[in-house]
């Protein structure tokens, strides 16, 4: 059967947008570090008819009948995630990282309780306590950051804020921190003040699964990860925790926050966990980091926050030679997709900050290695150094298309 034939016939408008997006993914270098390319098996799982069912509750304890096969799917996802990460308990129902984080706070704190999280502009996330987000409005979110001199986590500040504020939770795990996090130091501070240690490993979970980044599991009380970033599964999230917190976490997810679980997405999560124990996934995870290390070349022309990377992402300080917004636009015009990003102690505003964030998960999933990354870093430097030069951008665009043609995205998908 022709792929997406029913969609093409029923809704040519959406089908056409889908084809254009597929072409964009194929003909550009996607370097937003939270993006990736899910496998065809994950995409297929997302379209199975399990999507038709309501299944409030958990396997064996549902509020609706006829759930034996839905239970099979969810139990497989739970068991596979437990094995993959060495977790005592896993909840696979969260719709997204934001609702998963909300569930964790809901489970472990009362309204207006205090927690410590990293400030957004130093690499945190809105749900780590930003004042515009529920996490900053419903709780007393005390924010820590990185040191000015080396842009690494300021553990003296974390300890001081923890002692002063006696938080219920200390949160670590970020969206724009290129370095390895010292989980042990956080654990020690948590123990000193009697706080739960919560790690949001969304960005690096695939690296953990593949052994390319230390596992937070031995140190954490609760860990959350989205399943679509380096883990390369469907959009969604899971919560992993110690058995003693299992009931609190499960009750917070359902009935606390969510309704019917998205069982087709849970099936796709199960597929992703199966893929992530394969030897090829280890190679992929290590290759992500190796590829990112090659991009450190960029530091010959632009300053890298913290001087480089140990992970899948880099943060470039454009040093006022151009703004983040200008850089994002110039790279986009050249076929390289990145996102503007604040840098620690940024003097500019988030909508046009001083930096850009980029990473290697998507290019690694396409099969690119160190040789291609050297070319990619040269192209990025060329565009950033000539961001107003249309000829340069056109030439880079041509080179990007040539490179992309060698590493097609979903070649098996019909374009008719
Ligand atoms: N929006 C994600 C990111 O880009 O890092 C975090 O949720």
Image (cartoon, rainbow, N blue to C red):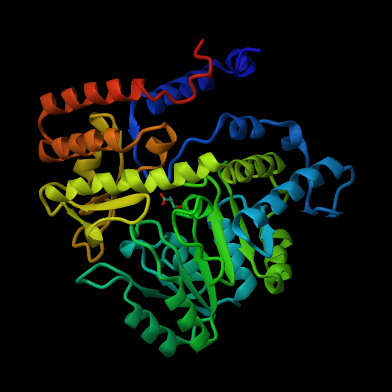
* Quadrant of the rendered image containing residue 342: bottom left
What residue is shown at x 45% (from left), y 71% (from top)?
Answer: 183
Number of numbered discs: 0
Q: Nearer the viewer, residue 325 or 30?
A: 30
In the image, residue 272 above or below residue 410: below
What residue is shown at x 31% (from left), y 64% (from top)?
Answer: 122
Q: Position of residue 33 (x, y in %)?
A: 38, 46
Q: Is residue 193 in sight in this rendering?
A: yes
* Quadrant of the rendered image containing residue 2: top right
Q: Quadrant of the N terminus?
A: top right
Q: Position of residue 365 (x, y in %)?
A: 44, 36
What residue is shown at x 58% (from left), y 76% (from top)?
Answer: 111
Left or right of 382, for residue 253: right
Q: Residue furthest right?
A: 65
What residue is shown at x 67% (from left), y 57% (from top)?
Answer: 82
Q: Nearer the viewer, residue 13 or 233?
A: 233
């Amino acid at each position: 059967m022709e792929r997406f034939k029913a969609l093409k016939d029923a809704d040519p408008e959406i089908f056409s947008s889908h084809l254009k997006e597929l072409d964009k993914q194929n003909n550009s270098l996607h370097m937003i570090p939270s993006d990736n390319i899910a496998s065809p098996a994950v995409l297929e799982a997302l379209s199975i008819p399990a999507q038709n069912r309501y299944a409030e509750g958990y396997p064996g304890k549902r509020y609706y009948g006829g759930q034996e096969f839905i239970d099979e799917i969810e139990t497989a996802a739970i068991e596979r995630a437990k094995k993959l990460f060495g977790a005592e308990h896993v909840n696979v129902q969260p719709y997204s990282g934001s609702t998963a984080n909300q569930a964790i706070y809901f489970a472990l704190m009362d309204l207006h309780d205090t927690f410590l999280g990293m400030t957004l502009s130093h690499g945190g996330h809105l749900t780590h306590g930003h004042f515009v987000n529920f996490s900053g409005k419903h709780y007393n979110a005390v924010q820590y950051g990185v040191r000015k001199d080396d842009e690494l986590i300021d553990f003296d500040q974390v300890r001081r804020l923890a002692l002063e504020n006696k938080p219920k939770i200390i949160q670590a795990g970020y969206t724009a921190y290129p370095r390895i996090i010292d989980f042990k130091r956080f654990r020690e501070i948590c123990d000193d003040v009697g706080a739960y240690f919560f790690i949001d490993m969304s960005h690096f979970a695939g690296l953990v699964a593949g052994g390319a980044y230390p596992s937070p599991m031995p140190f954490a009380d609760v860990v959350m990860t989205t399943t679509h970033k380096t883990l390369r599964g469907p959009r969604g999230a899971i919560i992993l925790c110690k058995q003693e917190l299992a009931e609190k976490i499960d009750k917070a997810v359902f009935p606390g926050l969510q309704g019917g679980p998205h069982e087709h997405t849970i099936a796709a999560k199960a597929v992703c966990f199966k893929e992530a124990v394969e030897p090829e996934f280890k190679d992929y995870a290590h290759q992500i980091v190796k590829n990112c290390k090659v991009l450190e070349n960029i530091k010959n022309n632009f300053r890298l926050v913290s001087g480089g990377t140990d992970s899948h992402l880099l943060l470039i300080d454009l040093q006022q030679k151009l703004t983040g917004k200008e850089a994002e636009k110039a790279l986009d015009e050249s076929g390289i997709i990145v996102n503007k990003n604040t840098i620690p102690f940024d003097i500019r505003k988030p909508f046009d900050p001083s930096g850009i964030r980029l990473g290697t998960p998507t290019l690694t999933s396409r099969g690119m290695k160190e040789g291609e990354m050297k070319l990619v870093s040269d192209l990025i430097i060329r565009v950033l150094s000539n961001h107003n030069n249309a000829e340069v951008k056109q030439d880079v665009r041509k080179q990007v298309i040539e490179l992309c043609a060698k590493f097609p995205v979903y070649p098996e998908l019909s374009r008719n």
